[in-house]
Amino acid sequence: MRAIMAGGLPGWGTLRPEEASAWKSPGTDKVYFIAIRFRAENLGPETGVWVSDSLSADRELLMSLDEAALRATTWPNASTVDTSFGPTMTGVKEAKACLGP
């Protein structure tokens, strides 16, 4: 989670993660959807989703998947790297649901 927030955008102030969850895509070894509820000094609560190949710090891949993730961090846009990724794909809703209400 710290690695994701470390990619935060200047001008938003400090991004403060409040809660995080991850959902592993069934049938894959290396696709994790990471949902993070966060706040920034100049922004109310937001929930963003990123996609990664690992939940550890030695990951090879970390990309922003939805609008909140794209606005909050400088990580690459997953859908421009691989067109099979997008904000409506299976995994986005599931990762957010793990956060609860």
Image (cartoon, helix red, strand yellow):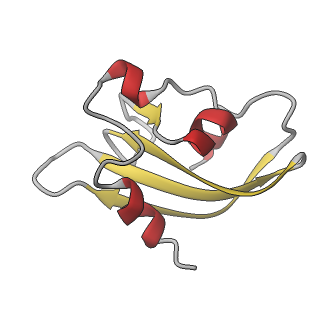
Q: Quadrant of residue 70?
A: top right
Q: Kindly identify the residue that appears in the image at 29 percent across and 25 percent down.
A: 83
Image side of residue 61 versus residue 83, left or right: right
Q: Position of residue 10 (x, y in %)?
A: 82, 27
**Which residue lies most toward the bottom here?**
101
Depth check: 11 or 93 in front?
Answer: 93
Give the residue furthest to the top. 81
Q: Is residue 93 above or below residue 79?
A: below
Which sits in the foreground, 1 or 72? 72
Q: Residue at x 65, y 42 (%)?
A: 5
Q: Residue at x 39, y 41 (%)?
A: 51
Image coordinates for residue 6, horizontal then vertical, percent: 67, 36
Q: Nearer the viewer, residue 51 or 65?
A: 65
Q: Is residue 6 visible?
A: no
- Count of numbered labels shown in the rendering: 0
Q: Given the current orientation, which residue lies at the most extreme left position?
A: 27
Left or right of 26 on screen, residue 72? right
Give the answer, above or below, for where 3 lies relative to 18. Answer: above
Report the side of 12 relative to 51 (left or right).
Answer: right
Rendering quarter of residue 69: top right
Q: Quadrant where the C terminus lies? A: bottom right
Residue drawn at point x = 35 percent, y = 28 percent: 60
Q: Front-most of 66 and 51?
A: 66
Specify whether residue 17 is in view.
yes
Image coordinates for residue 45, horizontal then vertical, percent: 75, 60
